[in-house]
Amino acid sequence: MFRIGFPPKFTLPRRCFHNSAPRTSWLFRSQTTSVPAIYKARKESWMKPTMILVGIMPFFTFGLGVWQLKRLKWKINLIDELEEKLQLQPLSLPPNINLSVVEEFVFRRVIVRGKWDNAHTMLFSPRVYNGVHGFHVVTPLVRENGSTVLVDRGFVSRDCISSANWLAETGEVEVLGMLRTSQPRNLFTPNNDPAHGKWYWTDVETMAEYAGGKAAGVQPVFVEQIFEGHAGEANTKLDKGLPIGRNPTIDLRNSHLSYVITWQVQSVK
């Protein structure tokens, strides 16, 4: 009898499965674990500077508060010093003023005598007095035995500026005023335009040149006329279009206390 022969059963070597399975699992395992690792690395890269910034912010704001406190004390002492200076007896300006010492006498009351040079009057705008819009009238004062100085005579309303009642004084006048210097303009204040008669901020050097300069004996000295009358008298001047001078007070801005509070509150948040 013949036997039917069957070929031997073919089986893949176990080694193939053994080698391929770990490679496949290693491939997927490396991909799944690398994503969180990258995310974690990126997160830590921006969290470290942020945490440092958050950590130093209270110390930074506290330091700003201390600095503003020092500025507050300085400003209070300055205002007290100027208030004392304002209470001193008025000085008569000498014929020729030493410009190098003018800063020492700022806010000091002075007396000047002379005649108005109305041809070189400067109108400063926009100005407001008790809700009324108008101008400040600045006119050179020609002193008989001395140099010419610039005087801010005060406020005149827009409705009365054309009446020119402020031009009525033609003889010698005596002015009680406060010695001042140029005032810095802010970012939104336009440049002065002397050629077209447009004035916005106090630039004493430019004003003196406009009035004739050194050749005409004009010194860059600026005086703000003082008004010491009552409210009724001020209203009368306002209605007649006569200049109303400034109050004899110190008008320095002092907002350092609000800055101190702001920064100290920020430091404890």
Image (cartoon, grey):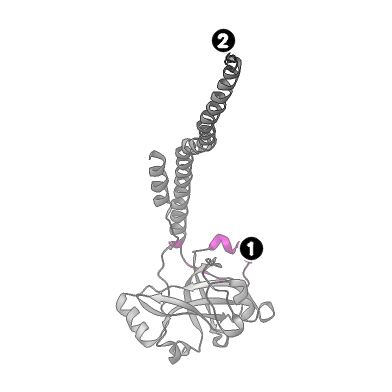
Q: Observer-nearest residue: 19 or 205?
A: 19
Q: Which residues are magenta?
A: 86-106
How packed mark 2 is, by other alpha carbons closer than 10 Å (few <14, some 14-19, many 20 or more), is: few
Quarter location, residue 154: bottom left
* Circle nearer the viewer, 2 or 1: 2
Residue 253 shows which numbered tag? none
Q: Residue at x 57, y 61 (%)?
A: 103
**Helix, strand or loop at mark 1:** helix
The residue wearing badge 2 is 3
Looking at the image, how many numbered discs can be counted on the residues?
A: 2
Q: Residue at x 46, y 77 (%)?
A: 126
In the image, farthest residue toward the front: 1
Examine the rendered structure and indicate whether residue 120 appears above or below residue 66.
Answer: below
Report the Cα–Cα distance between label 2 and label 1.
135 Å
- The reply to whether dot 2 and dot 1 touch (C-beta < 8 Å) is no
Q: Position of residue 175 (x, y in %)?
A: 48, 77
